[in-house]
Image (tube, rainbow, N blue to C red):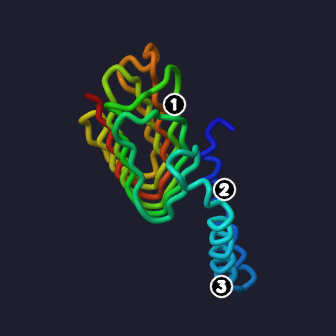
Amino acid sequence: MRDRRQFIFGGLVLFIGLVSLLSVILNIDFWDFCWPVGLILLGVWLLVRPRYSSLESNLVIRPLGDVHHYGERPLRDREIWIFVGDIDFDLTQAEISRGDTTIRIYGFVGEVNLRAPRAVGVSVSSTAFITDGHLWGEKRDHFLTPVRRVSEGYETAERRVRLEVMFFVVDLRVDQE
């Protein structure tokens, strides 16, 4: 699969469509069953995986709240799951290793801000129903359209950061100084 985020998003939309179709055909309200089961599964998942919610691990789970990365801390590959909240990455003083560093963010509604030095190549991709994008000073709103942009000199940069975002609604801001 070329893009795991599109697979997850497509599977979720397919599941919702199939459950809705079966509800109409069989005249049964499956949502009365699906919502409680979904909440139970989410609760079990959150209880069994608490060790992954620290900022030092590769996987950060924050159902509600914000995630920040500031200062001279090393930047590692990271996957962030958030329901509602803001994610701020100020990489102007961060220790970024050579090669690619990937930050994947999954959420429902939120704001994602990334600031990076000009010497670092930045690649941004967003899959969302609504993306309010402010990328390198250019504002563009996207509805049901994936966003893919790279900074100037990304391919030749010694240090590269790939930001991959999958939300329902996201306010995405990327700047380099």
Closer to us: 116 or 155: 116
Left or right placement of residue 128 versus residue 41 in this view: left
Residue name at image x 29 percent, y 42 percent: 134
Secondary structure of the residue carrying tag 1 is strand
What amino acid type is highlighted by mark number 1?
Thr
Q: Give the percent coordinates (x, y) of residue 89.
A: 37, 42
Q: Quadrant of residue 17?
A: bottom right
Q: Which residue is mark 1?
A: 101
Residue at mark 2:
11
Give the SS element for disc 2: helix
Assign the C terminus to one quadrant of the image.
top left
The local crowd at label 2, few if under 14, some if 14 to 19, many if 20 or more residues have their Cα within 10 Å, is: few
Q: Which residue is mark 3?
A: 32
Q: Give residue 116's position: percent from left, percent from top.
A: 34, 31
How many residues crowd mark 1 within 10 Å: few (<14), some (14–19), many (20+)?
some
Residue 72 visible in the picture:
yes
Cα gap from disc 1 to disc 3, whole angstroms: 42 Å
At 50% across and 39% down in the image, what residue appears? 103
In the displayed structure, does residue 78 sit left or right of residue 177?
A: right
Say which label, 2 or 1, has the lower sequence index.
2
Disc 3 residue type?
Asp
Question: Which of the marked residues, 3 or 2, is nearer the chain's N terminus?
Answer: 2
The label nearer to you, 1 versus 3, is 1
Q: Relative to 148, does residue 36 appear above or below in the rendering?
A: below
Kind of residue indicated by mark 2: Gly
